[in-house]
Image (cartoon, rainbow, N blue to C red):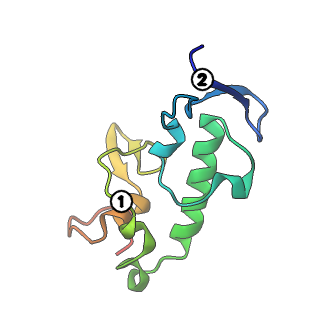
Amino acid sequence: MNGIKKKHCSSCQKPFNCGDTIEGESCWCNDFPPIFNPFDIADCLCPSCFKKACSDKIDEFVATITPETAIGNKASLLPETTQIIEGIDYYFEDGNYVFKPWFHLKRGYCCKSDCTNCPY
């Protein structure tokens, strides 16, 4: 037995492999920012629906941030990670990375590079 858990997405109903194995390995969803408990939304979500739910939750949070509240925000208190996720931390525009406000908020300060989506 390979220990992979088969689940159905509670949003789209598509089957997917849960990365949380019987052997105790960590799930792929742990690569996403721990900004909400997915069980607040539903049972397990497939990678596509989870990414969308995470992105929506981040967008809701970012909408509440002003330059005055950006410093010391809860995103900057999350554990540091070197992994960035397309659609969460950045998008591509004309072949270039464009960092989203969430990426800047996680960094915790303005880099003074006049970034397009700087919340500071």
Q: Amino acid at mark 2?
A: Ile
Q: Mark 1 highlights which residue?
A: 79
Image location of residue 3, percent across then percent down: 58, 22
Question: What element does badge 2 sit on?
Answer: loop
Taking depth in this image into account, of 106 and 39 the one nearest to the observer is 39
Labels 2 and 1: the sequence-earlier one: 2
Taking depth in this image into account, of 119 and 9 the one nearest to the observer is 9
User: At x 36% / y 79%, what residue is drawn?
Assistant: 72
User: At x 56% / y 62%, what residue is drawn?
Assistant: 59
- Residue 51, picture quadrant: top right
Crowd class of label 1 (few under 14; some 14 to 19; many from 20; radius 10 Å): few
User: At x 31% / y 57%, what residue is drawn?
Assistant: 80
Residue furthest left in the image:
112
- Residue 66, picture quadrant: bottom left
- In the rendered image, which quarter contains the C terminus? bottom left
Up/down of 42 relative to 62, above or below: above
Pointers 2 and 1 in contact (C-beta within 8 Å): no
- C-alpha span from label 2 to label 1: 27 Å
Taking depth in this image into account, of 61 and 32 the one nearest to the observer is 32
Up/down of 103 relative to 62, above or below: above
Image location of residue 113, percent across then percent down: 21, 64
Q: Amino acid at mark 1?
A: Pro
Up/down of 96 relative to 112, above or below: above
- In the rendered image, which quarter contains the N terminus? top right
Question: What element does badge 1 sit on?
Answer: loop
Q: Mark 2 highlights which residue?
A: 4
Image location of residue 5, percent across then percent down: 65, 26
Frontmost of labels 2 and 1 is 2
User: At x 77% / y 35%, what residue is drawn?
Assistant: 12
